[in-house]
Image: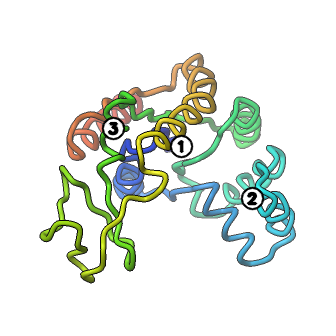
Amino acid sequence: MRLILVGPPGAGKGTQATNIIEKYGIPHISTGNILRDHIRRRTPLGEIADGYISKGQLVPDDLVLELVEERLKQEDCKNGFLLDGFPRTVVQAEALDQYLQKLDCKINSLVNIVVPDDILIHRISDRRTCLDCNASYHLLYKRPKQEGICDVCGAKLIQRSDDNETAVSKRLEVFHHNTAPVIDYYRKHGVVLDIDGTQTIEKVKTSIEAAIEAVVK
C-alpha cells in the first residue's frame, strides 16, 4: 500500500496519519523528519540540507528526492509507505513516479482531506498550547478544566503566534498555492481520494479506510 496524505493546517492530518499506519502496518515517511534526522546525524546529505535551512532557503528538489529515495530503499518500505509532506511540487511528483516505475510499482492513492478555509481558521484560532509542557487544548473540542490553565502541569495556556486568524489565512494561502498543482497531477492519474474532513475524527478515519479499501478491491 503506497499512499500520499495531503491536508491543510488544522485538517487533522497528523491524527489520520497515525490511524493509517496502524491500520495498514506501513511506515510514516515525513520529509521534515528525514531532514531533521540527517541533520542530527550530520550525514553528508544532512550537512548540505542544513546549509539551505539555516539560511531560510528551501531545500532543492534534487536533494529532497535523494533523501526520500534513500528512505524508500529501506526494508520497512518493502510492502508500502505513507508519504507526508512529499511530493510538494509537480517536479517532485514526476520524479517520484519515475523512481517507483524502476521498482515496478506506483502510488496507489493520494488521500486528500478537504476542509473549507473558514472552518479551518475557526479550528486553529481556537487552539491553545501550554507554555511549559506544550499540551494542546481547544476552546470548543478540548477545553481545560480551569480557564487558561493547563490540566497537566498547571502552567498558563497561550495562543501560538501562528494560530491567529491572519497567520492562519496566510498559511492556508501558501498551502493551496503549493499543493493544488500536485493534487491536480495525481487527479489526472485517477488516484485522488477526496475525504470530507469536516466530519468527526472517527468518521474521517472510517471514510479514509472505506475509500482505500474500494481502490484495493
Label 3 CA crowd tier, 10 Å (few <14, some 14–19, many 20+)? many
Quadrant in the rendering for residue 40: bottom right
**Separation of marks 1 and 3 at Cα, in angstroms:** 14 Å
Q: Nearer the viewer, residue 158 or 137?
A: 158
Left or right of residue 87, residue 16 in this image: left
Count of residue discs: 3
Mark 3 vs mark 2: which is more N-terminal?
A: 2
Q: Nearer the viewer, residue 41 or 173?
A: 173
Badge 2 marks a residue whose secondary structure is: helix
Marks 1, 3: nearer the viewer = 3
Amino acid at circle 1? Arg
Q: Nearer the viewer, residue 82 or 145?
A: 145
**Separation of marks 1 and 2 at Cα, in angstroms:** 16 Å
Residue annotated with mark 3: 208
In the image, farthest residue toward the top: 188
Residue annotated with mark 2: 70
Amino acid at circle 2? Glu
Badge 3 marks a residue whose secondary structure is: helix
Left or right of residue 99, residue 34 in this image: left
Left or right of residue 153, residue 12 in this image: right
Amino acid at circle 3? Ile
Badge 1 marks a residue whose secondary structure is: strand
Residue 139 location in percent, x, y?
21, 53
Q: Who's the residue at 61% across and 28% down the image?
A: 177
Q: Who's the residue at 76% across and 49% down the image?
A: 58
The answer to whether 216 is drawn above or below residue 161 in the figure is above
The answer to whether 69 is drawn above or below residue 75 in the figure is above
Residue 133 location in percent, x, y?
37, 78
Residue annotated with mark 1: 2
Left or right of residue 204, residue 212 in this image: right
**Separation of marks 3 and 2 at Cα, in angstroms:** 28 Å
